[in-house]
Image: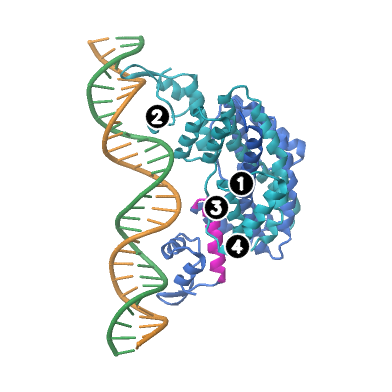
Chain colours: A blue, B cyan, C green, D orange
Amino acid sequence: MRIGELSKATGVPVPTIKYYLREGLLPAGELSSPNQASYGEAHIRRLRLIRALIELAQVPVATVKEILESLDADTEPLHEQIGRAHRALTPTRRLSASDDARAAATARVTKLIEDRGWSVDPEAPALATLIDTIAAYHSLGQDNLIAHLDTYADAVEAFTALEVEAVTANPTRDQLTESVVIGTILGETVIASLRLLAQESISAELWKNR
Amino acid sequence: MRIGELSKATGVPVPTIKYYLREGLLPAGELSSPNQASYGEAHIRRLRLIRALIELAQVPVATVKEILESLDADTEPLHEQIGRAHRALTPTRRLSASDDARAAATARVTKLIEDRGWSVDPEAPALATLIDTIAAYHSLGQDNLIAHLDTYADAVEAFTALEVEAVTANPTRDQLTESVVIGTILGETVIASLRLLAQESISAELWKNR
DNA sequence: CGCTTATGGATACTGATACTATCCATGACA
DNA sequence: TGTCATGGATAGTATCAGTATCCATAAGCG
């Protein structure tokens, strides 16, 4: 397959494919001569994955590169490989809060994790994000919403076990790690969309005549 | 309060505040003379909200502006005002898929919505995003993950009713709409973080020695 | 064989986004 | 009275995600 066909097969413009090649998101095709390379099925798959991450999940190109690199690093132990992908998948979203707001939020989150018996790396970026977000709720005067943290955690527990299980069913290691990435990222989009639809539906019902 | 104090109170640099004023995110202070304005508590609150949306939830500045405008448009009926804010909150994330993949995804999603008796505007951006995401799962060979769509929907239903209820408890209309915005956006961050933590915890347990 | 078109590779350019920096005339305040 | 901050305007910057252009070469067609 030549680059033009790869472009047709995926709907990605040729210059964009060249850009991804330059950036190392896509492995180079097999060169048959200095200006002729051929691409295969793997390139189509990779390109689809790249587009899904960038367009649907809004993952920055540099992060996509990291993720793909960790996908291809199949020499290290599985849980480390996945951890690396996972870390790349977690955006670092921070917001400086006052010290005591942070302390309170940290306490709240620590308690939640303890109560549930989760084993969480204290360095996990998602942990910092969660704490900052709780602190932000507080500083925005929305403490009443923090009260529902356990409801969120319950709901999350309800599907996470199934997600991990579904992913584990993959026969090969490559497929497993790829499923982790896709499941983690696209799953977030699915959950967010469902939530918005459910909110719309419920609130339309409730506030019809206010 | 002068701009320098506003800056100190919120941690936002003065030039950035000026930028937000220029962009219309923040209402101008009350001018006491051509080069002297005073800002109040409302400005602090507004600025905190802006920063939370931008930093934590990665909402683009232009969207923040739309959101704030809908917050301030308290002449229209409540559900319309909220609908407008809600629409601004929903990022339009699209990915072109093959026609039959889209059709299948649309059917799947329509069925889900019907089964649950949700009333959803067919124009809702979240709907298009959901359909595209389902189609993307398929084109990435992850149909097995689509099987869990109902599990996600169950979990989402579990907290959405409570969320809407919590928000409804707000005494004034202004507070209610602001809560909707904060709850919708920060809630997403909370859910995403919790999910990542839960995934990490469960998968660490499961794949310790693979 | 010749001609058009596509290709790989390199380099340069673009448009959007979110700030920063600078400038200036004026005003606050010590 | 002098220093500093301020409002307002305009210009500059860094990053990101592509696009565009160029070139020498190669493929495919008649």
Name the quadrant of the N terminus of chain B: top left
Q: In the visual, does B59 lie left or right of D6? A: right
- The structure residue drawn at horizontal position 67% and vertical position 34%, both measured from the top left corner, is B163
Q: Are marks 3 and 1 in contact (CB under 8 Å)?
A: no
> Quadrant of residue B161 in the image?
top right
Q: Residues within 10 Å of mark 2 (few under 14, many from 20)?
A: some
Amino acid found under the numbered disc labelled 2? Leu
Which residue has dot 3 on it?
A56
With respect to residue D4, does A145 lie above or below?
Answer: below
- The structure residue drawn at horizontal position 47% and vertical position 41%, both measured from the top left corner, is B60
Range shown magenta:
A41-60
Which numbered circle lies on residue B101? 4
Q: In the visual, does A25 lie left or right of A157? A: left
Disc 3 with disc 1 on a shared chain = yes
Kindly report the distance in space between the C-alpha atoms of the residues bearing marks 2 and 1: 32 Å
Amino acid found under the numbered disc labelled 4? Ala
Which residue has dot 2 on it?
B21
- The foreground one among B27 and A23 is B27
With respect to residue C20, does B192 lie above or below?
Answer: below
